[in-house]
Each structure stands twice: as C-alpha cells, then as structure tokens.
Amino acid sequence: TQLLEQSPQFLSIQEGENLTVYCNSSSVFSSLQWYRQEPGEGPVLLVTVVTGGEVKKLKRLTFQFGDARKDSSLHITAAQPGDTGLYLCAGAGNQGGKLIFGQGTELSVKP
Amino acid sequence: EAGVTQFPSHSVIEKGQTVTLRCDPISGHDNLYWYRRVMGKEIKFLLHFVKESKQDESGMPNNRFLAERTGGTYSTLKVQPAELEDSGVYFCASSQNRGQGTSPLHFGNGTRLTVT
C-alpha cells in the first residue's frame, strides 16, 4: 500500500517567516502534485512535478521533487496571511488519476 | 467554463437511511473520480470512471456503496444503508486526459455527509 507522510500537520507562523512542508514515502511516484484547499471548497492544484530532482517556482512558493521520486517539499518564502490554508501533497502512480494524498498541512500565517 | 459541481453540499441522515450524492463534471471530461475524506484522515480514492465505464473501483469500501455514471455525463454515489463511519466529505473530480500526473484533476467543493 502506497502512503505519503506529510509534515508538519499544523503550522502557525508570523507574517514574513519562511516555512517548509515535507511529503515522504517509501514508494516511487510517477509525479507529485501539490494542492491548496480553502474551507468549504475542493482542493485546487498548485503544481505538478514529474522529473526526479525537478524544482518549480510559483511566486514565493518553491516545489521540489526528490531525485528518487519518493519525496517532495514545498517551501514558502516570506509567508503572507493570504497563504493561510490547507496544503496537500498527492502522488500519482502509473495508473494515472488515482492519487495518494498526504494528510495535509494546516498553515496559519498571522499578521 | 463551469467547474465540477456537487450536490448537496451538506447532508445529514440517520444510520440506516439512504443518501445519493451527485457530481456534474466539467463538460467534455471523460474521467470522473470519487474521493472521500473521513475526519482526521487523508483524502482517499474511491473509484474512477472513464465515460460510463468503471475503470478502477478498488477504493470502494464495501457493497453499501454504489456509483453510477449514466451516459458518461453526471455521476451518482449512493450509500445504502448508511453507517456512522460513512460520515465525511465526498469529493468528485474530473479530468480531460487520464490524469497521468500532468493532466490536472479539477475537484468539486465536496458533499459533507453526516450520519447520526
């Protein structure tokens, strides 16, 4: 059974601080997706990383896929209150759309 | 374009009753998925339709759950009879391609099911 361990589960920081969220697995994924979810809404895709070692940037967010395609990280620089939300990582196997989700990281950025 | 639509947004039923959740995917998306998040747990895959055919139903918990996709358009997920452990948020998602990591899944806002 494929599992994705996401940490930390909760993170409360001050505006302007940096943070990193991790997703780790003993399984290899064909790709790794990061989602953000607001209360009462569904997850919204932020980025997909496909190649081992790949780094993608989305404004102040940096996503990295591990060389062995078993782990990934999300780094936020100078967090803003608008970054508050639930961040989810999800791994895709060779079967396509069937995603394995991590438990999520509830981020709170205080002004 | 309209997004994935799910209804109802909330449903509260008693144990033993039946509930039917509906999902309207984005028009033209052949792939439709059902996922569920039980409180305190991660979002878990339930099943995958390609058009009207069930491609993968390995995540369906048991035979109290029945999913259909009439004519390859909207989908329904029926729980009969509902049990307490069925409570959670049920998400539907659709994609144009097979979702091979590069085709994004578009999620609906979910149906929050509470079984009392």
Image (tube, helix red, strand yellow):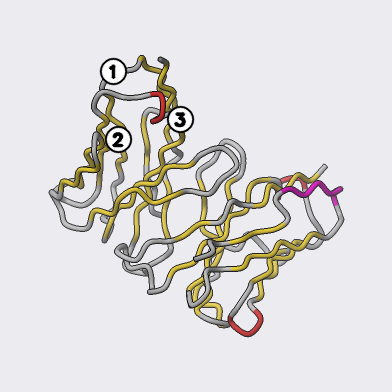
> Given the image, on which type of amino acid does mark 3 rest?
Glu
Which chain is mark 3 on?
A: A
Question: In the orientation shown, which residue stands out farthest toward the front?
Answer: B1
Q: Secondary structure at mark 1?
A: loop
Q: Examine the structure image and report whether residue A68 is included in the region drawn in magenta.
A: no
The one nearer the camera, A13 or A4, is A13
Quick check: B78 above or below B38?
A: below
Label 2: few (<14), some or many (≥20) within 10 Å?
many
1 and 2 marks on the same chain: yes
Query: What whole-number distance in Å separates the C-alpha atoms at marks 1 and 2?
Result: 20 Å
Which chain is home to disc 2? A
| Main SS of residues in magenta | strand
**Between marks 2 and 3 in the image, the one whose residue lies nearer the viewer:** 3
Labels 1 and 3: the sequence-earlier one: 1
Left or right, B106 with reference to B46: left
Residue at 25%, 37% (x, y): give it. Answer: A61
Span of residues in magenta? B10-15
| Circles 1, 3 touching at the beta carbon (< 8 Å) | no
Quick check: A1 above or below B50? above
Looking at the rendered structure, the secondary structure element under dot 2 is strand
**Quadrant housing residue A111:** top left
Which residue position is annotated with label 2? A22
Nearer the observer, disc 1 or disc 3?
1
Q: Position of residue A31 (x, y in %)?
A: 27, 57
